[in-house]
Image: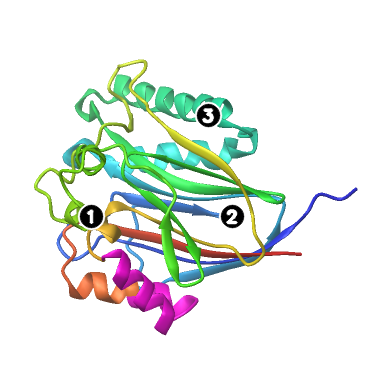
Amino acid sequence: MNAPKQRVEAFFFTNKGGVRKNNEDGLIVPGTLISDLSMKIPESYNGEVTNAIFCVADGIGGEEKGEVASQIVLTHLRDHYSEITDEESFYSVVHAAKENLESYVEKNPDAKNLGCTLAGVIIREDKAHVFNIGDCRVYRINGKFFERITKDHSVVQHLLEEGVITEDEMRYHPRKNIVTSSISGDGIKDSIHIWFRTINLRDQDQFFICSDGIWECFSQDELEMILQKHPGYSFCEKILIASLARQSSDNVTAIFLSTTQS
């Protein structure tokens, strides 16, 4: 029996944003890894897949080479994502990516503590493995509504769960950029905390994967309104244009993908 295939259409971009001098974000779609590049317009992917990864990464460390960390981690994920079948195997793959960062730091001591956060979706037959480490996010789109699937590893996520702040107040809180998990060359063996879930794909499921530069720039209501007025490629185009017009203080990266069972 042939494995179920998904027809996937994806639109994506990564850009340094309105303030930053360089882009520490990166992304993977099938056949493409983009790192340390600022895209002027979104690009697209269209294909039939039985096993494919869509992922964004946000480098941390600033002068400590966040863009290098994104590239090292994304390269490892691109080469090993097919080994991921559950939470345990996902942890093994990202822990090996961390070891690659540790090796880089050994050769480049000035890059100590370089690292990245990430989030993504692995489409495998009729299921989706959804994951994040840090505060990049994955939303599942139900009709016109964005449902945040992933759970941030951050100080403001903890404050949200304690009832101290609202979801929208996370975007403006002075501690919004403090993450409690990342893949880093910090020399600490068990410093990675992951969020991982496997879900059944529904026909015509849509997902939105983004770095924190996006969700800090747009409320969930705004994302829903923009998608309703500008579906498909236009959605990513409008998000990119608006984030630059709003002088987004962080790098901005997003993948919008739609699935249909072949």
**In whole angstroms, how far apart are the C-alphas of marks 1 and 3?**
28 Å
Residue, far left: 174
| Front label number (2 vs 1) | 2
- Amino acid type, residue under disc 2 in the picture: Pro
Up/down of 124 relative to 142, above or below: above
Residue identified by numbered label 2: 30
Marks 3,2: beta carbons within 8 A: no
Q: Which mark is residue 22?
A: 1
**Sooner in the amino-acid sequence: mark 2 or mark 1:** 1
Q: Report if the CB atoms under discs 1 and 3 are less than 8 Å apart.
A: no
Secondary structure found at label 1? loop
Q: Nearer the viewer, mark 1 or mark 3?
A: 3
The kind of residue on which mark 1 rests is Asn
Rendered residue at 41%/76% (across/down): 227
Q: Secondary structure at mark 3?
A: helix
Mark positioned earlier in the residue sequence (3 or 2): 2
Q: Earlier in the sequence, mark 1 or mark 3?
A: 1
Q: Main secondary structure of the magenta part?
A: helix
Can you say whether 79 is above or below 22 in the image? Answer: above
Magenta span of residues: 219-238
* As drawn, 260 above or below 69: below
Foreground residue among 167 and 212:
167
**Amino acid beneath label 3:** Val
Q: Residue at x 29, y 60 (%)?
A: 214
Q: Where's residue 135, x and y in %?
A: 31, 44
Q: Which mark is residue 93?
A: 3
- Crowding at dot 2, Cα within 10 Å, few <14 / some 14-19 / many 20+, comes out as some
Q: Quadrant of the C terminus?
A: bottom right
The residue sitting at 51% across, 71% down in the picture is: 143
Residue 232 shown in magenta: yes
Pick whichever, 119 or 60, lies toward us. 119
